[in-house]
Amino acid sequence: MLSIESEVLERHLSVFEQKNVLLFGDVRDDFSGLIQPMAKSVAVFSSYFDYARHYNNVEFGLECYQQADLAVFYWTKNKQECQFQLLQWLATASVGQELLVVGENRVGVRSVENLLEPFGEIAKIDSARRYGLYHFRLENVPTFDSKKFWKSYHLGDLDVFALPAVFSSAELDNGSKLLLSIFNKADGLKGKVLDLGCGAGVIGACLKQQFPKIKLTMSDIHAMALESSKRTLAENQLEGDVVASDVFSHIGGRFDLIVSNPPFHDSVDTAYRAVEELIAQAKQHLNRGGELRIVANAFLPYPDLLDKAFCRH
């Protein structure tokens, strides 16, 4: 099934004929397969591991360096993330580069005009079902400095670092604060600990700082979160493994503690898929006597899921 963004692009299939095409941004379907027969080549780049792991032709990472005659950027749900990804890629391109940008009005795709206007000609060429499609031609190659996108803050003795669109990027959220408050040194936490959906790495790094003997693993689906967690650990001289995984898809072994402030928002909508998998599969990844500790808003239906998976909570 095509996303609405791809359905808008489908109205313009002729532009892909005999072109080397790059799809990047928040790509969520197999539009590449649709245009493959008419294009000279199609490459796909994604910073989202939950999407990338399902397709052999998708490159997963933080920064994209693939070149193309025509690139298509799927607008993400975070303006600063879009700015990071677009400027990073355009800084590697040449004058005359063509780019299409497609996205939903309610998540800010209209702002692409102000974002890209200083660097070339941009015009809206189509709209449908509250989605817009823009054409851009590069005239002034931008400079890109990733340092400008980093945010940091202090949390006691811990320095937290984060890139755009990463959870807990500006301050410690109330949920993570509550979760961390239940740990104290008297507990003597030890063994293998998994921080699942690590974001900027706040929870895992705090636990590693408080309990240095634990063997820490941190995971997330978002390349920006993984890079943020790596830096948070490095800047605080803390050790831990940081891995890309869609819930438990690429997590090996068992743990004495799985801890998470799980996401329940898919862009501007509420989605429970990741949380349901976390709770349903956690038991298979815990050592005997191991614990799952998560935090959630009171309105979310987690108690029933926990009772079903563990018989109690």
Image (spheres, rainbow, N blue to C red):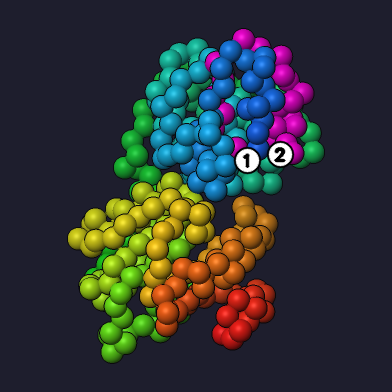
Q: Are dots 2 and 1 in contact, CB under 8 Å?
A: yes
Q: Which of 53 and 31 is in front in this view?
A: 53
Q: Which mark is residue 140?
A: none
Q: Residues within 10 Å of mark 1 (few under 14, many from 20)?
A: some
Residue 232 at x, y percent in the picture: 30, 58
The quadrant of the rendering that contains the C terminus is bottom right
Q: Which residue is drawn at 71% across and 39% down?
A: 3
- Magenta region: which residues? 1-27
Amino acid type indicated by mark 1 = Arg
Residue 248 at x, y percent in the picture: 50, 59
Residue 12 at x, y percent in the picture: 73, 20
Q: Which residue is drawn at 35% across and 42% down?
A: 148
In the image as oriented, which residue stretches furthest toward the bottom? 186
Q: Which of 91 and 189 is in front in this view?
A: 189
Magenta stretch holds residue 7: yes
Amino acid type indicated by mark 2 = Ser
Residue holding disc 2? 3
Residue holding disc 1? 28
294 horizontally vs 215: left or right: right
- Quadrant of res 122: top right
